[in-house]
Amino acid sequence: MTKRQTKQDLVAGLDVGSGRITCLIGAPDASTGTVRVLGGASVVCRGVKGGVVINILEAAAAATRAVEEAEAAVGATVSQVWLGVRGSHLQSFNNRGAFNIARTDREITAADVDSVVGSAKAIPLSSDREILHVVPQGFSLDRQRGVPHPVGMEASLLEVDVHIVTASSAHLNNIMKTVGQAGFQVVEPVYGLLAAGELLVTPEEKELGSVLIDLGGQSLSIGVYCEGAIKYSKEIPIGSDFITRDLAVGLKTSIATADRIKIEHGIAHPSLLNGDADVDCHGIDGRTPLRIKTSTMMGIILPRVEEIFSVVAEDLQNSSYADVIAPGGAILTGGGSLMRGTIEAAHQILGVPVRHGVPHPDMVHTEEEKWLSPVYSTALGLLLYGAQPRWGAAEGRFLKRQKPLWLRKISAVLQELF
């Protein structure tokens, strides 16, 4: 840290993924809304499956290790983290709100924007669910659509279209308890897909129409953008760990060995099969030598990869957004997107241009290129999210954040007491 940089100047993103927990620590620049990555760490976690805590003790131990290793790399400590969440317990939908401007001047204020967003999120929810995000998609003034920033303009009727993300209260509480037990305070839980989208999807891709696909180990996140905002998001319980298990069964080797050879030698599309090299490894007992043909591996990998992207294509078709993404195409991120041939397989099945998600150099600065890998895209997005605390409807940004869960609970207790 520099002499002027204090502990309070740092921001930490903690991504609870599909079997791994990743922590990045950075220094935000409030004047530019950018962040410099100072260091981080990523650890395997058996206490989390598909973004859901299944063993709070193991998950807490992994979270502690991830943050402490990141702190050691940076040479500073943090007490708060921006928590990235994912998993099939997250659900989303679109809604619309309206608010009448009764004042004689009819000039729209930030409070009016908050009121119209509040009307859009006033929806009935079951007792086991809560709103995680309300994302304004666009405003209308006296029925005129397409207004991105209404503050300061005049109208009698202010309307807003929003994208609402809800979470299971129980699963969210378990993740929050995990981080608390690890010794850290959650500033706010954030849907990892939205954080990654702000980092990886360009303004032009958001305007023309595109889809962000975050391929994790045990879950897959889809986010469709159009007309400058997110229109659709979905969590699907399928991921690259399915490929690893297929390899382990098909090759009669261990999960660890299957994962290693998948990363080092795996091919997901026949166009990249250059010859038929041999890959040496060991059987499931860790001792019996095996020699496997690359074509044999591809024969196991290819059907599962085709299934994964066919599920994505079917979901987009059912959502009626399949045609929307054609201009901007698909952006792939997540550790599962790194296997050779994944881009080609996605292009063949989705029928649109496909690229890897790469952070814009003007948004994130780092001296270690590894942090720009798709493996860390969600954690990077959390850093950027934490570096821009003024996000919200009133400021014309995309994410309308809710009060942190711990703050909402304290507020409820105080209301009961007083």
Image (cartoon, rainbow, N blue to C red):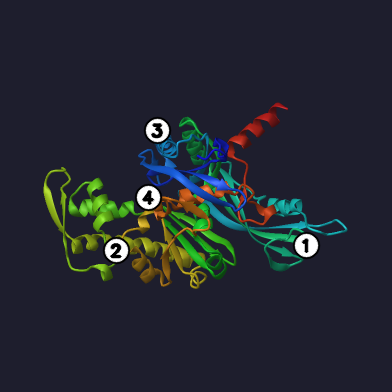
x then y, percent, for residue 333: 42, 58
Circle nearer the N terminus (4, 2): 4
Mark closer to the chain start, 1 or 4: 1
Marks 2 and 1: CB-CB under 8 Å?
no
Q: Is disc 3 surrounded by few (<14), some (14 to 19) or many (20+) residues within 10 Å?
A: some
How far is disc 4 from disc 3 in space, using C-alphas?
Answer: 20 Å
Can residue 328 be seen in this snapshot? Answer: yes
Q: Are marks 4 and 2 in contact (CB under 8 Å)?
A: no
* Cα distance between the residues tagged 1 and 3: 51 Å
Q: Residue furthest front?
A: 3
Q: Secondary structure at mark 1?
A: loop
Label 4 sits on what residue type? Gln
Kind of residue indicated by mark 1: Met
Q: Earlier in the sequence, mark 1 or mark 3?
A: 3
Q: Which mark is residue 61?
A: 3
Pointer 1: what residue?
153
Residue 197 placement (x, y as % from top left): 51, 57
> As shown in the figure, which amino acid type bears the numbered disc 3?
Ala
Q: Farthest residue in the top direction?
A: 417
- Residue under numbered circle 4: 218
Q: Are marks 1 and 3 in contact (CB under 8 Å)?
A: no
Residue designated by label 2: 268
Residue 56 at what x, y percent from top left?
A: 42, 34
